[in-house]
Amino acid sequence: MKILAFAGSNSHKSINKDLVTLTTTYFKEDSVEILDLNDFEMPLFSSDRAAKNGIHQLALDFAKKIDESDLIIVSLAEHNGSYSVAFKNIFDWISRIQNRKAFGNKPMLLMATSPGARGGASVLEIALKTLPHFGASILENFSLPKFYENFQPGTGIINPGLKMELENKIRIVKMQTMVKVELPHPN
Ligand SMILES: Cc1cc2nc3c(=O)[nH]c(=O)nc-3n(C[C@H](O)[C@H](O)[C@H](O)COP(=O)(O)O)c2cc1C
């Protein structure tokens, strides 16, 4: 299985990237690519720009990465109760590519974390409501509150209940995305 993972953040110290990176370690037998949104920085989306110059090449590249994947693992940074500009800009650009749903009808494990007690609950709620309309098939979602209390670099999630919750959800995602078993052809 090909996994595309990224944080919805352009911070070089992104805690969401830490969570995404940890989560990908549970998919050892799969091929994993972790993207950095800084590599897909484009001018702010504008309808005028898109009409004049077409869809930005980096948006086409990002969409191709989605299309080539079997599972998307994403953890969203929450900025003022919503998406970070870095994520929203890419989302807007790829949503204007003709004849595609932005997230390509791909299965998605959707997460969020923040230093606060709500763990990005607002952005997670927005994403849960809206991303399915844009081709995200959300299999599970997970919020990690109080990142700096519950996560230790090198160790991962140190709160046993939250660790178990994530691991259970990963198990469900794995079961739902398992490669279909080829049955022997009946003679
Ligand atoms: C512009 C801005 C707005 C923020 N708004 C929120 C917010 O609404 N809720 C929240 O929990 N944290 C908020 N934060 C704190 C972020 O959760 C924190 O910076 C976190 O590290 C972002 O994730 P990242 O490290 O993956 O970029 C905000 C941070 C910034 C810079």
Image (cartoon, rainbow, N blue to C red):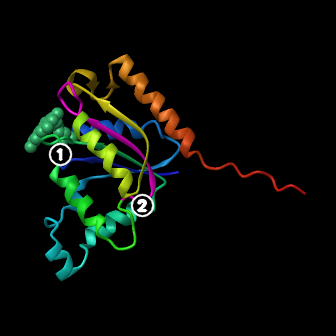
- Residue 45 horizontal/vertical position (percent): 17, 66
Residue occupying the point 30% across, 46% down: 127
Query: In what quadrant does ligand 1 lie?
Result: top left
Task: Out of 126 and 64, give the one closest to the viewer.
Answer: 126
**Residue 141, above or below 37:** above
Q: Is mark 2 within 8 Å of ligand 1?
A: no
Q: Is residue 80 shown left or right of residue 127? A: left
Q: Is residue 118 magenta?
A: yes
In what quadrant of the picture does the C terminus appear? bottom right
- Residue 183 horizontal/vertical position (percent): 76, 51
Amino acid marked by disc 1: His
Residue occupying the point 54% across, 46% down: 177
Query: In the rendered structure, which disc, 1 or 2, sits on the residue that comes first in sequence?
Result: 1
Amino acid marked by disc 2: Gly
Task: Out of 62 and 35, give the one closest to the viewer.
Answer: 62
Q: Name the residue beneath numbered marker 2.
A: 104
Q: Name the residue beneath numbered marker 1.
A: 12
* Highlighted magenta segment, given as a residue range: 103-120
Whether the residues at callouts 1 and 2 have beta carbons within 8 Å, the answer is no
Image disc number at residue 35: none
* Mark 2 neighbour density, 10 Å: few (under 14) some (14–19) many (20 or more): some
Q: Is residue 29 shown left or right of residue 53? A: right
* In this view, the mark in front (1 or 2): 2
**Residue 23, above or below 146:** below
Between marks 1 and 2, how big is the CA–CA gap? 27 Å
> Does residue 39 appear in the picture of this structure?
yes
Q: Residue furthest top?
A: 160
- Residue 57 horizontal/vertical position (percent): 27, 73
**Residue 130, above or below 150:** below
